[in-house]
Amino acid sequence: MAEAGIARTVNAGILISFTAILLAGCAVAGKPAPAEAVYTAESTYQKLIGSYPFIQIASQNLPANVQLLRDLPYVSREGKDLQLDLYLPVQNSPPDLPARPALVLVHGGGWRSGTRDNLGALAIRLAERGYVCAAISYRLSAQARYPAAIHDVKAAVRWLRSQALLYHIKPDQIAVAGGSAGGQIAALVGVTNDMEKFDLAAFSTVSSSVQAVINIDGLSDFTSEEARKYEDDPSKKTSAAGAWLGGSYAEKTALWKEASPLTHVSKDTPPFLFISSAQKRFSLGREEMMGKMKALGIATKHVQLPDTPHSFWLFDPWLEPTVDAVSQFLEQIFAKKH
């Protein structure tokens, strides 16, 4: 599980802290990569309110016990900074603040749209529970095809771990979570821990491995017949998955399989939590993936929120049970590391 890489990170603490301070100081000057913001809580609300008249967009009002650092650059791609927003629990015991677990949060949007702002409410409520949360932007399919997003998320994990001293993070307790396409990306990031092919900086002294994964209503298998009914629809000139993977299933069969988290399950796979809606199509492959993990003795759990639409985590009353599930799972997994 990349413990050696994590240990190297801790041993390099002094150097890392100076790097962190420099990076934080450059946050405002960073050049953000553009992002298509078609998929937002507001646009999704308009689609759902007719069927779910009781829902409300989850508030992103910042409470007193959460600090937000916006627009921190975490990696540069082709001369443009990719940025993240860092949500920190506020604690009243400086200067010896206890270290805390952390999450990298990956937004959805069919690999081609969306914004990290969509995860602000989730990040705030997790920060209130004591987690450091980094809601990230990453390259979308119009900017760079698969596996660019995987490279970016791993860079964000590495950045977060490199800031362990500055932001009081436990470097051996970092998880990755995402919703919809972000859930699929998060899952693929987790099952490819320490695989050089998926990490542009695989030989860095700072590890990009994660110790847990939360896949919220994201695909585990692109290649199943049922998944391809939606993701490889011939009536669409280019499907969302096809645009990200650079071609249809028939044209890019090997890539469709490679991009499926189910393909990479091994004894080194970290613990997985799956949170799903009542819409089965968005979590296809989950049962098979959980079966593989259970056979290998890997901790895995599934929580389904009944009568929910896709994108439920953007709205109340469903955000709170989502946060409950994430927090309870991580508490259980990370307690074993003590």
Image (tube, grey):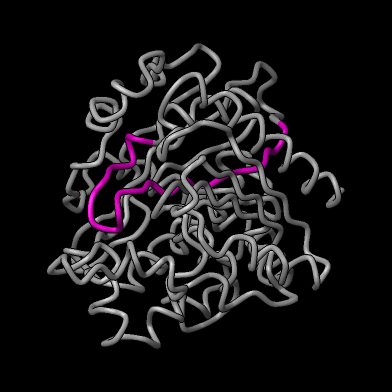
Which quadrant holds residue 135?
Answer: top left
113 falls in the magenta region = yes
Q: Is residue 148 left or right of residue 174?
A: left
Q: On screen, 176 above or below 284? A: above
User: Which stretch is magenta?
Assistant: 98-118
Q: Residue at x 69, y 77 (%)?
A: 266
Which quadrant holds residue 53?
Answer: top left
Q: Residue at x 55, y 52 (%)?
A: 215
Horizontal and vertical percent position of residue 306: 57, 32
Q: On screen, 96 above or below 142? A: above
Horizontal and vertical percent position of residue 118: 34, 35
Q: Residue furthest left?
A: 237
Label count reads: 0
In front: 338, or 235?
A: 235
Horizontal and vertical percent position of residue 78: 20, 69
Q: Residue at x 25, y 30 (%)?
A: 47
In front: 208, or 227?
A: 227
Which quadrant holds residue 253?
Answer: bottom left
In front: 82, or 302?
A: 302
Q: Is residue 102 left or right of residue 36?
A: right
Quadrant containing the N terminus is bottom right
Q: On screen, 90 above or below 76? A: above
Q: Is residue 22 left or right of residue 90?
A: left
220 falls in the magenta region = no
In front: 6, or 325?
A: 325
